[in-house]
Image (spheres, rainbow, N blue to C red):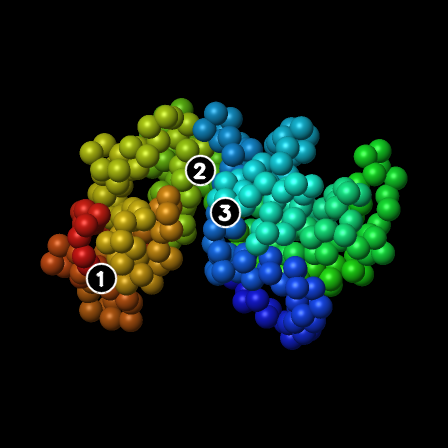
Amino acid sequence: MLPLDFSAATSIATAGALSADPELAAVHEYLRQADPTGQRFANVLRDTIDQLLNGEATGRYDWKRLFKTEKTHAGTLVEINLQREFKFSDGNTMDYRIAGIEVDCKYSQQFGGWMIPPEAVGHLCLLVWADDYKSQWSAGVFRVRDEWLNHGGNRDLKLTVKAEHRSQIVWLWHNADLPENVLLHMDAEDRDAVFASKSGQQRLNELFLRVQQRRIGRNVIRTVAQQKDYMKRVRGNGGSRSALRPAGIIIMGDYESHRRIAEKLGLPPSREGEFVSARVATAQSHHSHLPRVSIDGRDWVIATAEDPPEMAPQLPPPSSLV
């Protein structure tokens, strides 16, 4: 994620806005303290988009496949889910009270498309944007002033922020990384191969075979399996872990022991509810340049194209150290 001072100009504008508006500064500080890295915000946005897609029941992974009414409902769900995550108090006139201050919340899937009600003029707004195609999101605090708004002709008299005044938004996080929707971004041929089978277990096996060294979120698993016991389908004892071991593939979850293995192999460690698969090989002399990890008394590396498949090691249980 980009740090708060993602550009010198923005940093100067932010400092000026915070010093000129104590309420804005208080809300900004509260949110930064509550979520210093932005990961909680990012997870809420990821989960909300996945909630709308409802992949387990529908098999959908693409925002464009949502009905118009579902897209309209997205803003309300973001507002609700942020309040649940951060336990904001209800506002008297706006959506929330944050640091004792009335704050409205507006979400848009299109950057700059926030629809602000006339009653929010004079108040603070938490403006949130996320784009699943770009895998990015932003959130900032904005003092709603009439002269900074477009007065459109829509029936409900909603207002938008003039493009030239978006600089007045004090960003908490700007163009930060949204956890990837792997199904949306993977190669189309690979995606078709994943969904070709009628078996949920086979679809998951194909997913972990074709999408390696990338984080795969819980909702992707749910969408591919389309079964209530989807997490069981990943594990050993008949799941993808045991099915893909003969091909040399390990599937690391969010256990600390698995995260250590991923890090030592130079892979992105799984965050909560995520998995990372990779084909490994026993370390040989020609692997001297590759990072390695010891599992079951043997050193392993990420397999190269020249390495033949071999039986992958059994991953340690959750409590084990690596």
Of callouts 1 and 2, which one flags the residue occurring earlier in the amino acid sequence? 2
Q: Is residue 17 left or right of residue 138?
A: right
Residue at 26% across, 38% down: 235
Q: Which mark is residue 86?
A: 3
Image location of residue 96, percent across then percent down: 61, 44
Q: Write down the quadrant of residue 25 in the picture.
A: bottom right
Look at mark 2 in the image and give the residue it sits on. Answer: 219
Q: Considering only vertical position in the picture, is 304 above or below 70? A: below
Amino acid type for the residue under numbered disc 3? Phe
1 or 3: mark nearer the eye: 3
Q: Write down the quadrant of residue 196 in the picture.
A: top left
Q: Which mark is residue 293?
A: 1
User: SS at mark 1?
Assistant: strand
Distance of label 1 from label 3 (alpha carbons): 38 Å
Of 197 and 129, which appears nearest the observer?
129
Residue at 72% across, 51% down: 123
